[in-house]
Image (spheres, grey):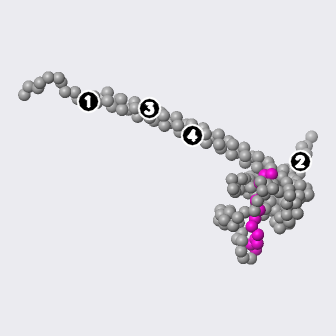
Amino acid sequence: MPLIKTPIEDLPMPAQFIERRIYVIRGQKVMLDSDLAELYQVPAFRLNEAVKRNNNRFPPDFMFQLTQTEVKSLTSQIAMSKQEGRGGRRTLPYAFTEHGVVMLSAVLNSIRAIQMNIVIVRAFIQLRQILAENKIMTERIHSIEQTQKEHGTALIGVIRDIQKIKNPPTIRAIGFKIR
């Protein structure tokens, strides 16, 4: 019996492609409105229009607008298009947290948006698992470093004791020396 493919498996973008578009801004993992618009195959201004029409669904922990400083930092890091000039953005981009992305599926009522949201949420989950594993590995490495320091200190003491045994200090004999 052949396996039936789900619509999600037919999506052209693998989770790794989406993970590269998840940034850490203000200590939160977010996706930019332009990246989400590309994934949903809608213009960014249409996505932002839908969000503005439903702004009560997007509290600050779901979505926030970047500052000029954050935009400059991102522009240099990920080669975003420039703000000014031909073809650039006129407004500061919005960043959506994982919860904001989930809420977008309620605002954008297309099959593509729902399918992409499932893929995006899975990418957030996978990223969270990777970070958790990374934290565990960091703790293990720290533990190993501490053990190595303790062993190093012990070895230095052993080496000093061996040197004392090999080269005992000269002790003057008690009494007078006859010349």
Measured in 3D between alpha carbons, the distance from the residue under mark 4 to the one under mark 2, in whole angstroms, is 45 Å
Residue 122's disc number: none
**Viewer-nearest of discs 4 and 2:** 4
- Image quadrant of residue 51? bottom right
Which residues, given as a range, are shown in magenta?
87-99
Measured in 3D between alpha carbons, the distance from the residue under mark 3 to the one under mark 4, in whole angstroms, is 19 Å
Q: What residue is rendered at 52% in x and 37% in y?
A: 146
Q: Are marks 3 and 2 in contact (CB under 8 Å)?
A: no
Q: Give, as a three-letter code, the residue at label 2.
A: Lys
Number of numbered markers: 4
Q: What residue is rendered at 69% in x and 57% in y?
A: 25
Residue 142's disc number: 4
Q: Are marks 4 and 1 in contact (CB under 8 Å)?
A: no
Structural crowding at the residue carrying mark 4, measured as other residues with C-alpha within 10 Å and reported as few (<14), some (14–19) or many (≥20): few
Reading the chain from its start, which is encountered first: label 2 or label 1?
2
Left or right of 176 on screen, residue 55: right
Q: Is residue 157 above or below residue 69?
A: above
Q: Check disc 3 and report its element: helix, strand or loop.
A: helix
Assess whether residue 50 is covered by the magenta stretch: no
Q: Where residue 106 appears, x then y in whole percent?
A: 89, 55
Q: Which residue is mark 2?
A: 5
Q: Are marks 4 and 2 in contact (CB under 8 Å)?
A: no
Q: Which residue is mark 3?
A: 154
